[in-house]
Image: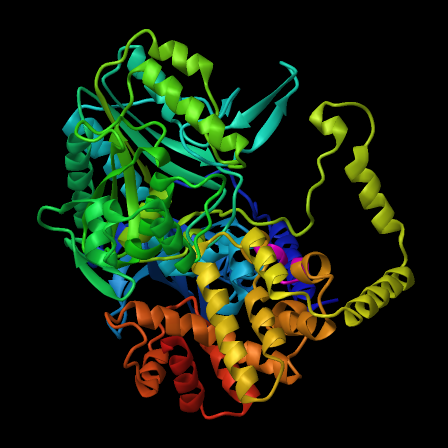
Amino acid sequence: MSRLDETIQAKIEKRQALQDRGVMVHPYGFDKLQSIAQLNQADEGASAQTAGRIMTKRPHGKVIFLDLQDSTASIQVMLRKGELSQEQFELFQFIDPGDFLGVIGKVMRTKTGELTILASEVKFLGKALRPLPSQWNVAEDKEVRFRQRYVDILINKEVRQVLDARWQVVKEIRHFLQDEHDFIEVETPILQPLYGGTNARPFFTYMKSLDTDLYLRIAPELYLKRLIVAGYERIFEIARNFRNEGIDQTHQPEFTMIEWYQAYADYQTMMNVAEEMIKKLAEKVNSSSEIMVGETKVDLAGKWPRIKMTDALKEYAGIDFDRLDDQAVQALLKKHDIELVGKFNRGVAMFNLFDKIVTKKLIQPSWIIDYPRDVSPLAKAHRDDPRFCERFEAYVGGKELADGWSEVVDPIDQRQLFVNEQQLMRAGDDLAHPTDEDFLQAMEYGMPPLGGIGIGIDRLVMFLTNTWSIKEVIAFPTLKPEQPIKITQLQRGEGKGGGEGGGEDEGAVGKDKESVGKEEKTRSQKKSSHKLPSRQKSRQLFEQYIKNENLRHHCLMTAQAMEAYAQKLDQDPELWFQTGLLHDLDWEMFPDEHPNKAVNELLLDYPAELIKAVQSHASLRTKVEPTTLLDRYLFACDELSGFLHAYSLMRPEGFVGMKANKVKKKLSDKSFASNVSRDDIAKGFELIKDEPLDHIQFLIQVFTE
């Protein structure tokens, strides 16, 4: 029996002991008259009648001290023999941290001055069967934290503070729009016969009663606009959306956004309202217009500049797009490693260049306006130049916060935009917008001039709390189940039996350990016999499985570092480059299976030494330790490259002039680039047996060049 099992069994026995003494271990209620936060403001001698969870228990002979916590605060409770009945005092040999307790007594201060409730009566309110962990913020065990999020929130005050900020943001948005700007909150369907409202890949499901497939909404836009047709003039929805795409630091497949629409308004009006709202939210959450975005302080006060996308490309990238012919634009795309889906399109090319080069440089609050119409199928053509549309996005600290536009209200114009999207879809763009005939029919009944905007609530909370991991701002983020679920045909309503999924599972279970072991050995031998594929093939894999620009940049940096070290150490530069390029191949699409998905399915044509290096760079997951030169240098370059990139972004000159000793000093600042493991960086230094400053300086030189 494990230690945890023994602890659970002991708690079950204590539960039984309480029952044997006539205690109802899970009573029906308690008359809680004050929150603990209220008692923390009470005068000495005030009556107290409150309840909460016992967080700690400290017996001292005839006195027992407890820390009692509710949803508002915590307070010390003193249990003293003589104040409590003998029977009640003796019960505390069976009461543990994690249990719930009602307390009646008086507020006092101890000799040390600590505010305390001196209990005169207690009521047992619930027994916990699992022990509360004493520490739950271990960085390398984040997956456990998110899987048992209820414990994470209970133990870690910082986690609770971020989520409390989220609930406050939602409350203040409602107050701002409803009470200050006369908007009405509405609801639209999540299950839809056709998805729409943005360019994204949907989830779908089956409704048995109607015998039809349905989509989960990717955005509420088209239904909100139907309500505008119906006569509403100012509406908003805080909507749960679902997009069947990758998971990374800023994206989840299930997320929350707000969209609002205002009749007789254009995109200038929408920017005015959104800017006012974001400023007020910052004041409510942070009590200041100045906030931190990463390590950068930004001030939201004052009028935010409104910069045309073409002007932003000139100012921040030195690109005068209107002066470039198609050949010059294509050369720029190649230079910046940008590939367009389908046929070449100038508007799409402009947006991709802006997104890749400029956005990270937009630190102080800015509106980027007047986007190419080719990337905005629901936005109205610009009143002065039909190549563009009246679209805007808000950027602060290099992060995009809001997206909106003057809306298309002409059904003929909208139909043509949908036709253009279908051409993109036929050219291979699986994110292109489908044609919604019912929506077009609604538009034909007439729509007033209209402005609209969408803001991701998760992204907004990340911004306002300076918490740059989307999982941290969602109470229960999407994770891959520890035992993946296979929905059977019967569950789908498609017929009898378990379906193909059940058959596959049954076959896997039927294999004995010896057979599985032989298969693993055979697979390993096959890998060992493979030669290194071409760099072109590896780049194709890289492009196929890694879409996130930040992750692409990280992998390319690691590959560059590995290639440089291979040349220095007289190793195979091609092998080392491709190992660095592919080491996170499955991280974006299969984060919960990393790196095993890549090792067992995606890299079967690659040699064993590359496979082992990929396994060993994530040794906490695979239990494969880095031993070879290739393994050790991949481990040493991986995390440190990420840290160096983060540090370069806060320096106007990037890597130029960067000093190794300054980097090492910055490593000690745990609040900077907190997602980068300092332990892994330290382990990397040990693995390559190089002086840390030498290793850092070598990488700086590589990335500068």
> Quarter holding the N terminus?
bottom right
Q: In the rendered structure, which segment of residues is drawn in magenta? A: 591-597
Nearer to me, 349 or 288: 349
Does the magenta-highlighted stretch encompass residue 108?
A: no
Does the magenta-highlighted stretch encompass residue 593?
A: yes
Can you see residue 90?
yes
In the image: residue 282, left or right of residue 60: left
> Quarter holding the C terminus?
bottom left
Q: Main secondary structure of the magenta part?
A: helix
The quarter of the displayed image where residue 668 is located: bottom left
Can you see residue 363?
no
Nearer to me, 500 or 168: 500
Q: Which residue is drawn at 88% across and 61% down?
A: 513
Nearer to me, 236 or 95: 236
- The percent coordinates of residue 608 (x first, y second) are 73, 72
In the image: residue 385, left or right of residue 79: left
- The percent coordinates of residue 656 (x first, y second) are 29, 78
190 in relation to 633, above or below: above
Q: Which residue is drawn at 66% across and 83% down?
A: 627
The quarter of the displayed image where residue 308 is located: top left
Q: Which residue is drawn at 53% across and 88% down?
A: 568
In the image: residue 520, left or right of residue 249: right
601 in relation to 498, above or below: below
- The percent coordinates of residue 560 (x first, y second) are 49, 73
